[in-house]
Amino acid sequence: MTRIVYLNGTLLPFEEAKLPIMDRGFLFADGVYEVTTVIGGKLVDFASHCARLRRSAGEIGIAVPVDDARLLAIHRDLVARNALDEGTVYLQLTRGAAERDFLAPEGLEPTLLMFTQAKAVLANPAAETGIAVASVPDLRWERRDIKSVMLLAQVLAKRAAHEAGAQDAWMVEPDGMVTEGASSTAWIVTQDGRLVTRAKSHKTLPGCTGLALEALIAETDLRLEHRPFPLDEAFAAAEAFNTSASAFVLPVVTVNGRAIGKGVPGPVTKRLRDLYLAFARDTAV
Amino acid sequence: MTRIVYLNGTLLPFEEAKLPIMDRGFLFADGVYEVTTVIGGKLVDFASHCARLRRSAGEIGIAVPVDDARLLAIHRDLVARNALDEGTVYLQLTRGAAERDFLAPEGLEPTLLMFTQAKAVLANPAAETGIAVASVPDLRWERRDIKSVMLLAQVLAKRAAHEAGAQDAWMVEPDGMVTEGASSTAWIVTQDGRLVTRAKSHKTLPGCTGLALEALIAETDLRLEHRPFPLDEAFAAAEAFNTSASAFVLPVVTVNGRAIGKGVPGPVTKRLRDLYLAFARDTAV
């Protein structure tokens, strides 16, 4: 089966999809992206990803060249053409291609690229075992609320985590507070059962999965606190977990080699994963 | 005349040079770059750019796939094939192309791209008139000493400067200190004739032109102070200027619309530009 991707209005074989060397995504990281998860051939929390894409693009002055209905149609075409049952649809929007100059010319045609990746989502083994996390200094820029492709700090964070035997990194500010995972939102569950994660700010990406989970939590008896937490509080927590579009709710069982709680996925995390899974199945389009 | 670029070992026409969509430079800003200026068909301060390229690449764990002699040969080939008399050679090195994953696979073949751009260097009209600078908050990441393609903050800074009627931006930290220009090193000349620019640190890029100029200054009677300076000190300065590979020494005559000194290029700036021009001509290869 030929892998089909979308590039600037056209569905075409993966090998034929090529970028001009002057694309500003390549030269300047002048672009934004989204990753939408697919289960059972349907898109999870799609409207939320569209909204975030428009916000990110708007913050850096790139117009999204297609409307939400067309975005949905392209996503669905890609899922169908690649017979994708479980995995992700990656979307990248850049300011376009032009002779290299920091100052982009007016009226540039944006580059819109989309492709699928197959991966285990519902039967992700890490959801059963939990993952190890390593902390790294948060080296990123000041506008982490924009989902830009300026991802080198996260690339270095993931590599450092990998070298430490961990599957994700928690990034920590000089003030000792955890901001978020390298590709996820960080949460802890305190010994008295409160959920703690950061409030939205320029310091972190507004996670679509975290946002949806917060709405689900509001309908339970669980208490949610929006505030930063230090690593020490995580070490003393009952449970920890990450949320992300592609992994949903993923238990964190060790941080820097220290067991969190009993060192196995905890009951609150499992409950939240089940809640999110039900939401994902019910609302996928 | 067909524009010729270099991509991964091959010289080829501009239109034929295309990048795979999975290039990590495009997806993750996982790469570094250099810009070397050409005057009279020769490369200015070439060894310094090679050394900085190796340092930047080393800091993020990318091996430069060719030695300095080969880099020089490719630069010269491009200059000859494009009949470039004055302008720049742009070089970008990325970790390579692989299925999208923050964690890059081992043994990836790096992407090495180089192309030329013609522009007026010696007869740059801005060197006669000076330029206007606008200040913007410095939003960049913590490793600005690495010349990475994570340039979105600089793109936004240049656009903000342009919208304010300025030709470059000076980026300012929350502590009120100027770090550097969006694509240059910032300098002031105090009323008593001292030159002030920041010392090397992770806060700024180690500018090749600034470094060469410092060596030239050391052989004059001019006094150089390595320290940060606030905007207010720039407003009260006798002169200001930027250094960069493609503009050498460029007078800054206004900052945020306020004239610096007499609001025209000053004698110290002119002297330093002449010094650098002589160095550039004498040492170009």
Image (cartoon, coloured by chain):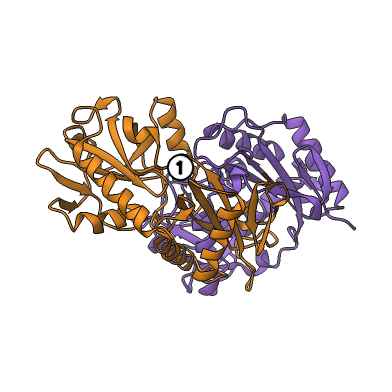
Chain colours: A purple, B orange
Q: Residues within 10 Å of mark 1 (few under 14, many from 20)?
A: many
Position of residue B102 relative to residue A208, above or below, is below
- Quadrant of res B111: bottom right
Residue occupying the far right of the picture: A1
Residue underneath mark 1: B153
Camera-nearest residue between A285 and B23: B23
The three-letter code of the residue at mark 1 reads Ala
Residue displayed at 69% across by 56% down: B22
State left or right for residue A260 relative to residue B99.
left
Residue displayed at 69% across by 31% down: A65
- Quadrant of res A23: top right
On the image, the x and y values in percent for residue A269 come to 59, 58
State left or right for residue B196 relative to residue A39.
left
Which corner quadrant holds the C terminus of chain B?
A: bottom left
Camera-nearest residue between A134 and B127: B127
Query: Quick check: can you spot residue A209?
Result: yes
Q: Secondary structure at mark 1?
A: helix
On the image, the x and y values in percent for residue B73 come to 55, 65
Chain letter for the residue marked with disc 1 in the picture: B
Residue displayed at 53% across by 65% down: B71
- Quadrant of res A231: bottom left
Residue displayed at 78% across by 44% down: A6
Camera-nearest residue between A219 and B78: B78
State left or right for residue B5 relative to residue A224.
right
Which corner quadrant holds the N terminus of chain B?
A: top right
State left or right for residue A77 relative to residue A48.
right
On the image, the x and y values in percent for residue B122 come to 39, 42
Position of residue A219 relative to residue B160, above or below, is below
